[in-house]
Amino acid sequence: MMRKTQAQRSFAGALVLLGLAIGIALGCRAAAAQESEAPREVGRIRSRDLSEISGLAASRRNPDVLWMHNDGESREVFAVATTGKLVARVRVPLQLEDVEDIAIGPGPEKDVDYIYLGDIGDNAQRRREVRVVRFAEPALEAGHDNIKADGVEEFRLKYPDGARDAEALMVDPATGDVFLVTKDDRRTRLYRMAGGALNDGGTASLELIGYLKVDAVSGGDISRAGDVIVLRNEKRGWLWQRQVGENVAAALEGAPRIVLTRGLGQAANGESIGFDFDGSRYYTISEGEFEPIYVFAVPEASGGAGD
């Protein structure tokens, strides 16, 4: 048997050490990647006036700003920095009954982003009609922290099959169609109102377009690019990848991926969810005073449903 020289033994040892170093480096990189993808707290609400947050939408016009509102008869929309600092209040000059969700989407003016406010709650299922309010997203300016919503439109909507309780409002960025998702334990209903049929001050009938295999839905959102859809309840979320040319109803027919919606520091009662500007992450907040704002990474599309 040939004996290894000292030089050969030293070279072999160096290879082992190099392999160990590479392995450690790759392990550290993988750990760092996992850490970066983990849900994390990015801020905490600093205003006592936001103690029952029910809806959330990331601003398209103001960097690092989230639009929020309280549950119920709230007539204010709050601009909050992702750190949790209150930036501005926007007053809606209408009497609202039960505001449950907020979304951002297209509207009548090209290349303008609009805020949609869903006065759609109906726990007793007695309302003859629900409402969606729309106005152009305001640009926030230093020194202007109290704003009146400009050019407010009001759409009255009726269900085709009787009163329903809904807490999730979504707007398709491709078509401007408005979607409502009911808060049912079984046979959750998906309704649509064509964006082109929205008539300020008028009343129109929603269209029942499907049933979803999810339950107790309390919020939802569609990404700015329209390629990701998310719904949530207090315990979990469901995420769908939407293909090019596919409508919202068809996308939601597929099996969703189960995702987290509640961070470790968040209270149990959570209703709000909204994608960030590029759709790579989504934010959630629970109800309660000084609640933390959590951000979650959207899982890659290659994963299977339920991963």
Image (cartoon, rainbow, N blue to C red):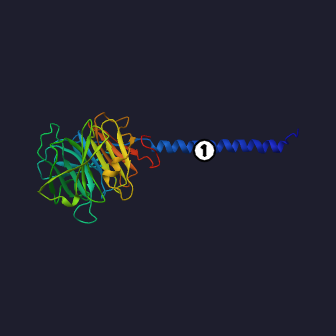
Asked if residue 248 shows in the view, the reply is yes
Placement of the N terminus among the 4 image quadrants: top right
Q: Nearer the viewer, residue 61 or 272?
A: 272
Tell me which residue sits at (49%, 42%) in the image: 34
Q: Residue 11, how many percent across, how many down?
A: 78, 45
Of all residues, the one furthest to the top in this rendering is 268
Which residue is found at the position 30% from the left and 54% from the top?
59
Residue shown at 18%/58% (left/top)? Answer: 198
Q: Quadrant of the C terminus?
A: top left
**Neighbourhood count class around disc 1 (C-alpha, 10 Å): few under 14, some 14–19, many 20 upward:** few
Q: Quadrant of residue 109?
A: bottom left
Residue 164 image offset from top left, x and y in percent: 18, 42
Q: Describe the element under mark 1 as helix, strand or loop.
A: helix
In this rendering, does residue 87 appear at all? no
Q: Is residue 204 left or right of residue 244?
A: left
How many numbered marks, from 0 up?
Answer: 1
The residue indicated by pointer 1 is 25
Comparing 228 with 15, the one in front is: 228
Q: Is residue 147 left or right of residue 58?
A: left
On the image, which quarter does residue 136 sit in? Answer: bottom left
Q: Which of 206/88 is in front?
A: 206
Which residue lies most toward the right here? 1
Left or right relative to 99: residue 41:
right
Residue 168 position within the rendered picture, expressed as x and y whole percent measured from the top left = 25, 45
Q: Amino acid at mark 1?
A: Ala
- For residue 153, side relative to residue 27 (left or right): left
The correct choice, above or below, for 134 with respect to 305 in the image is: below
